[in-house]
Structures are given as C-alpha cells and as structure tokens.
Image (spheres, rainbow, N blue to C red):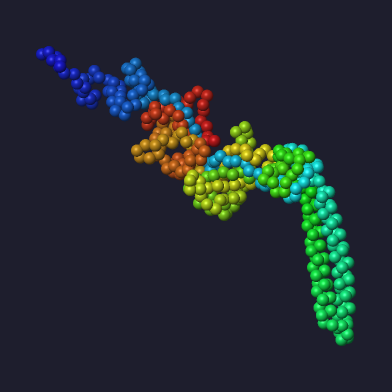
C-alpha cells in the first residue's frame, strides 16, 4: 500500500456545484453534470464525450447532440386481426376405384392425369361371363313363368269344381300350393335377372365424381379381383379443395364467436407466390381439441378455379378473425418497455426527442395498436432509441424519410 508524502493530498472528486473557483466555466460545469448523469445510467457514448470535449461553442451537450435515427408516422386505419399457420391442401373428394366383380380388364378409357367428369367410362371388364349369366336367368324366368301359367289354370279349374261341389278340397289345396310355389320361383328368377344385370353393369366402371385421374395401377389385360385391397386408380376432386390447418386452443373462442356472425375469410399462399393469395372461407371446426398438441383442426374451402392449389401441398395460411376500425398503429420497433410500462420516443417539429408513455393493444403483423398516448400523424423513432435522451436532437438517416406503418 502506497504512502502519501507530506506534501501530497489524497485525490478526490468534487461535484461541480461545490466548486468555488470562478475559472470553471458554465459549459464545463454543465458537461460535468451531464457526464455524471449519463455515466450513472451506463449510457456514455463517443458522441457524448465528443459533445463535452471543450471544443464546442458552449451551447450545451443536449443541443449539440444529433442522434441519427429511423422514424415512422403513426397512422389511423382499419386492420385485420389474423391468425397465421401452416396448412396442407386436401382434395375435396377422393375415390379409390376398385372393381366389384372379378374378371379381365379389356380396356382403359382414360389417360393418367386426365380430368374426368362424373359418369365418364374408365374401365371395361370382360362382359361375356356376365352376359351369359343374364341370359341364363332370363331363360329360367321364362320356364318358371310357363309353369306358373299352367299351375294357375289348374288352380282356377279346381277352385271352380270345388265351388260346384264336384272337385275335392285336397285337389284344390294341391293346385293352390303348386301355383304359389311357381309364383315364388318367378319372383326369384326376376331377382336373379336384376343381379345379373347389376353384375353386367359392373363390367363398365364409371367415374363417380368430377376430378383428376391419378397413377394407373392396373392396366388392360390384367385380371382384377372383386373388392381387391389395391385400388385400380385414385381420383381426386381438386375444384374445390380444402386446406387443413391447426390453431392454438386459446384462439378457439374468438374463432367460434366470429364464425357465428359471418363467414371468416382464409387466405393461403405458397412460398413461391409473390404477393398473390388464394381466398377461401372457413368451413369446418373440429369437434375436439387435440390434447397432445393443444391445437384444434380447422378447414377452409377454396374454389381453386385455376387449380393453383394441389392436394398434399403445404401452404401459408392466414385466417382473418375480425377487423379493428380506426386504430392508431406504429411499427413494433417503435414500442419500448421500461419500468413504468410501454413508451415511445416522439420527434417534435423541432426534431427534439420526447419520451411518451403509451398503452398498447394487439400486435398485428409488424405493427402495434396504440390504445392511448399517441395521435395519428405524430412521428416516432423506430431505430436508434438506445442513444436517445429526452430533449436530444435527432436527425433522420440519409435517404430514410418518415414513413407510415405498413
């Protein structure tokens, strides 16, 4: 430990307001006070030091300080409250085409990827075995109808004889039973004919929906099995389409409440889209929340007239829940948080910075709603706040004039 000499005094700092020496100028005292304050706040900068270097004209630290900043105008506008998510395009209808009978595929009447309409012929299965079955059923019907006609005549004859007390009851009963038996046989033959006709119709497989054909699995010449596990081809209806997406369960109440009042628009875009979005409407809310993820599944319906959306494609989804009218908005970067809450730096017409306490609302995209504390048209600082103090003079960075929020 060093020892002071008899003629040495221990160094100490004396506040400028205790200095009695008239040689200390007002500017020096002001700079000393400001440097003490700024140093205590941990905000000593090169600009601050330069401002009190003693080479100035004596106009003061704050007035000589020109802090370069970015600024924006607070604007009043109507803004949407949006929920953003990642979604997946789903075909409106999907049909896995399978044969309902077994046989040989003789013809394929479409090309892979072709658009088809409901009722268009897709496949032909060899119809000859089914035509033969139909002919056999028709022949059985003709035979049984002839026998039924004979039995009917016998039944009517014995009924007449019984009425005249000539025939016996037993003969009448037997004739009636034979007639009823042949009536049932004829009905069975008619059902067999319908079954044969249906089976014959299954030899022509037609499209049940409007859609686009997928990859052909079973080509002509192959034997197809009835209700095989593998589909012959898949048809997807892509006009319209669904877009599936999930939102956090905390948003469920406001989505349901607003959906009950009106249709909620949904916008989707792909990463390759340049500002273009497809518009649809929310059409489905799942009946339960997924407990594993805390989200709920929603679906939007899109007409997809230009077939821009494709099943299985991932898209960016924006659900517009409601719109807020006449809201004062500033960029998110303008809002700062301190011990007393939120605040912004406002630039007055003299290019002086002022701290303004504000009450903020919802954050929408890159902007924040200012509920109270700011008026439309006022200029706020969006970059450079760390170098500002109340009353500091600001300068807008070259080429970056005040802009409104997006």
Residue at 87% over, 79% down: 158
Coordinates of residue 67 in the picture (x, y in percent): 42, 25
Relative to the observer, which residue lies in front, 217 or 393? 217
Residue at 12% over, 13% down: 5
Coordinates of residue 265 in the picture (x, y in percent): 60, 46
Q: In which quarter of the image is the N terminus?
A: top left
Residue at 77% over, 46% down: 103
Residue 286 position (above or below residue 33) = below
Coordinates of residue 347 in the picture (x, y in percent): 44, 32
User: Residue 52, can we see it?
Assistant: yes
Q: Is residue 12 left or right of residue 252?
A: left
Relative to the observer, which residue lies in front, 167 or 85? 167
Q: Residue furthest left?
A: 6
Coordinates of residue 310 in the picture (x, y in percent): 66, 39
Relative to the observer, which residue lies in front, 113 or 38? 113
Residue at 84% over, 61% down: 140
User: Residue 239, can we see it?
Assistant: no
Q: Quadrant of the C terminus?
A: top right
Residue 296 position (above or below residue 43) = below
Task: Please identify the quarter of the rendering in which residue 274 is found.
Answer: top right
Relative to the observer, which residue lies in front, 119 or 104? 104
């Amino acid at each position: 430990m060093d020892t002071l000499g008899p003629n040495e005094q221990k160094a100490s700092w004396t506040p400028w307001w205790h200095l009695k020496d008239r040689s200390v100028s007002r500017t020096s005292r002001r700079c000393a006070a400001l440097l003490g304050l700024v140093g205590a706040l941990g905000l000593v900068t090169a600009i601050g030091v330069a401002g009190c270097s003693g080479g100035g004209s004596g106009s003061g630290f704050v007035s000589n300080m020109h802090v370069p900043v970015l600024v924006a105008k607070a604007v009043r506008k109507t803004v949407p409250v949006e929920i953003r998510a990642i979604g997946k395009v789903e075909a409106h209808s999907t049909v896995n085409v399978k044969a309902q009978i077994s046989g040989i595929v003789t013809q394929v009447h479409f090309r892979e990827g072709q658009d088809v309409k409901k009722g268009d012929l897709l496949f032909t299965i060899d119809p000859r075995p089914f035509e033969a079955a139909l002919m056999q059923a028709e022949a059985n019907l003709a035979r049984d109808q002839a026998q039924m006609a004979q039995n009917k005549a016998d039944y009517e004859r014995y009924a007449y004889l019984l009425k005249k007390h000539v025939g016996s009851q037993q003969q009448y009963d037997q004739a009636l039973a034979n007639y009823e038996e042949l009536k049932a046989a004829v009905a069975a033959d008619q059902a067999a004919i319908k079954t044969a006709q249906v089976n014959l119709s299954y030899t022509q497989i037609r499209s049940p929906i409007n859609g686009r054909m997928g990859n052909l699995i079973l080509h002509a010449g192959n034997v197809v099995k009835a209700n095989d596990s593998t589909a012959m081809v898949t048809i997807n209806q892509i006009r319209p389409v669904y877009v599936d997406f999930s939102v956090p369960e905390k948003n469920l109440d406001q989505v349901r409440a607003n959906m009950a009042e009106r249709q909620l628009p949904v916008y989707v875009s792909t990463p390759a889209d340049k500002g273009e979005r497809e518009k649809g409407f929310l059409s489905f809310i799942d009946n339960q929340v997924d407990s594993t993820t805390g989200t709920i599944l929603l679906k939007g319906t899109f007409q997809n007239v230009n077939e821009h959306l494709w099943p299985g494609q991932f898209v960016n989804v924006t659900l517009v829940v409601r719109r807020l009218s006449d809201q004062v908005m500033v960029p998110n970067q303008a809002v700062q948080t301190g011990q007393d809450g939120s605040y912004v730096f406002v630039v007055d017409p003299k290019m002086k910075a002022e701290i303004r306490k504000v009450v903020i609302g919802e954050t929408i995209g890159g902007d924040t709603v200012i509920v109270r504390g700011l008026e439309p048209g006022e200029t706020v600082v969006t970059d450079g706040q760390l170098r500002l103090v109340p009353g500091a003079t600001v300068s807008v960075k070259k080429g970056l004039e005040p802009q409104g929020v997006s």
